[in-house]
Image (cartoon, rainbow, N blue to C red):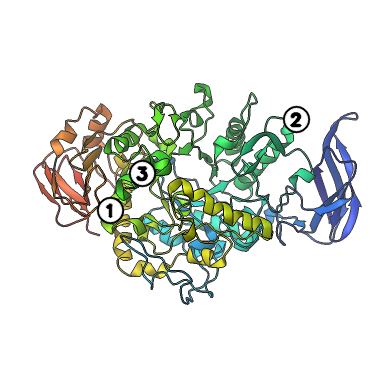
Amino acid sequence: MTHTFRVWAPGASEVSVEVDAVVEPMLRERDTVASWTGYWRANVESGAREPRYAFRVDGEGPFPDPRAPRLPDGVHGPGQVVDHAAFEWDDAGFRAPPLSAALFYELHVGTFAPSASDRAAPPHGFEHGGMRASDEVDRVGEQLGAGTFDSAADKLPELAELGVTHVELMPVASASGSRGWGYDGVGLYAVYEAYGGPNGLKRLVNRAHVLGMAVCLDCVYNHLGPEGNYLSRFGPYFTDAYRTPWGEAINLDREGSDEVRAFILDNLEQWFRHYHVDAIRLDAVHALYDEGAVHILEAMQRRVRRLEGELGRPLQLIAESNLNDPRLVRSAEAGGYGLDAQWSDDFHHCVHTLITGEEQGYYRGFRSFSALSKSLRDVFVHDGGYAPARGRRVGRPVGDLPRSRFVHCNQNHDQVGNRAVGERLCHLVSSERAKIAAALTVLQPAVPMLFQGEEWAAGSPFQFFTDHQDRQLAAAVTKGRCEEFSYFGWDPEVVPDPQAESTFRRSMLDWSERERQPHADMLGWYHALIDLRRSYGELYASRWSKPPVVYDEHGRWFCFRRGRFGVAFALSGSADGEQPGVGGTVDVDLQSLLGSSHATAADDVAATSIAGAGGAESSKTGSPSIVLASSDAIVLDGFRLTLPPDTMAVVNVTGEQERVRY
């Protein structure tokens, strides 16, 4: 069988390819008689359908192919050819749901669904206020197997039943060691072998599609990891014109950048074409430094739109950015990059600070009902104004952009895992407050996203873990991890060692918790919220702009309206930082919500005439009724809603509706 091997190495004098231990010289590839492309090519006979291979450059090596579709022996070993056409798919006709109806669920393959259930004594105690992780819940044993694509696929029916529409995988590109978050990938075309390699990922995507769920893959194009990174041996993949917080910047606009850009764009395409993913989350796009006339993000959008037409199914690009810049999701015709959506951290910061009382570090400037109101109505709290945590003005207004172009959450891998010991929200606050955060996230106007285990208030933390084989690098990572927490005032002495296997195992989910209290109660709460959202059109990601909001900063209650539904909650304590658990009941006048100057004509129409996903329109008006409540002590008398401290309710403000019991 003849295999063609091709590699870009514009500065090399000679290149050879080693195929199954046989070395063959490569020839320069020319697009005309006089012009050399910088590529080298060789046609090699091999008895294997998927042979292993590596390149030698100017007598050095062998090095893995920068575009190796598989690295079966890890990032330092040879690549392997992959016959993508050999996989049998069962997902013909699947189309990803629109973002307006989406519910994302972020997961880490290695910790989401451990491949065995045996448990031993806990290597580390973990206890905090609120719904703490008990000794029983926190047991993480030496016999507990790491999660794989196949073990994750086995749990997908539970996510489908929950109402998830998009399963978002943290990065799966090949990286050093057998565990890690994935953001230090170096073999960008290869799938992490520890999870199950290329076919394992395909099986997971195929299973998700059969169950009616789309798959979003987190991809990192702003830097590569430090271990196993051989790209500089081949060409100018990096530039010293810029610097990222994580290492060398990718060369997107300097000499030789055309082929570097092609390297990224082709990689983007392979995930859609060969792995059938439906969306890609682009990590930290503010670190994609590109001063060219066509920014790499615009080039990505163009490539994906062409591919969308070719494949005949919707494809989505979702950016992560800390710039609060809506141009990312504005159309190219309107001067934007045309991406489909972007993460917005401002909503998270508002919810987190109000629920926990924390306001240190980058949380400064978010702990108020007015900030929460602005995030619900305008997406960005900082949209051109002064941001205290940054000491400067940040962002610009989103204007009339649909809220389906923004993704909101109250937890994600960064916000949990980048805490000193990886506490989830339920480890920091009471279950009552965690329920308020859940309701705000699921029922707010943008696209909601959950983080693995959030729906049952998982007892396990999610901590930062690595498996670097280079001892000096490992030591530097451990030291740097401790130093960075000084910004938040956290004690570095309690920071788990990222290199310790116990840190990884401690972060594994325990699915048996779902059947026990208090986890089963929280799971029921999430089911009720999500069922409500997907049953009524006005609770989808909003096509119109600003929901009506009323609140009392001093009285510690807040209410906003989505069509016929009012969402109200009350917090104990006071605005100046008293501890939760004190304070009395509050009365919320729902008529003030209906009469809010924030109300829009679209909201009024939605309140009376939008049909729910499940059936008939609701056009009547009458006495309000409680649809869902976190406590039986909540009382509705006409338009007066009485809320005890740390409770919330969803009220049909236009008429009677059966109450949901969970």
Q: What amino acid type is highlighted by mark number 2? A: Glu
Residue 172, position in %: x, y? 59, 54
- Marks 3/1: CA–CA distance: 17 Å
Residue 134 sits in quarter = bottom left
Vertical side of 235 occupied by 77: above or below: below
Q: Tell me the mark number nearer the camera, choosing from 3 and 1.
A: 3
- Which tag, 3 or 1, sits closer to the chain's start? 3
Front residue of this view, candidates 198 and 521: 521
* Mark 2 vs 3, N-terminal side: 2
Q: Which mark is on residue 433? A: 1
Residue 156's disc is none
Dividing the image into 4 quarters, which one contains the N terminus? bottom right
Q: Which residue is mark 2?
A: 255
Q: Position of residue 74 (x, y in %)?
A: 70, 60
Direction from residue 59 to residue 75 in the image, left or right: left
Crowd around label 2: few <14 · some 14–19 · many ≥20 (10 Å): few
Q: Is residue 530 visible?
A: yes
Specify whether 303 is left or right of 572.
Answer: right
Residue at image mark 3? 359
User: Which quadrant: the C terminus?
Assistant: bottom left
Give the mark count: 3
Q: Secondary structure at mark 2?
A: loop
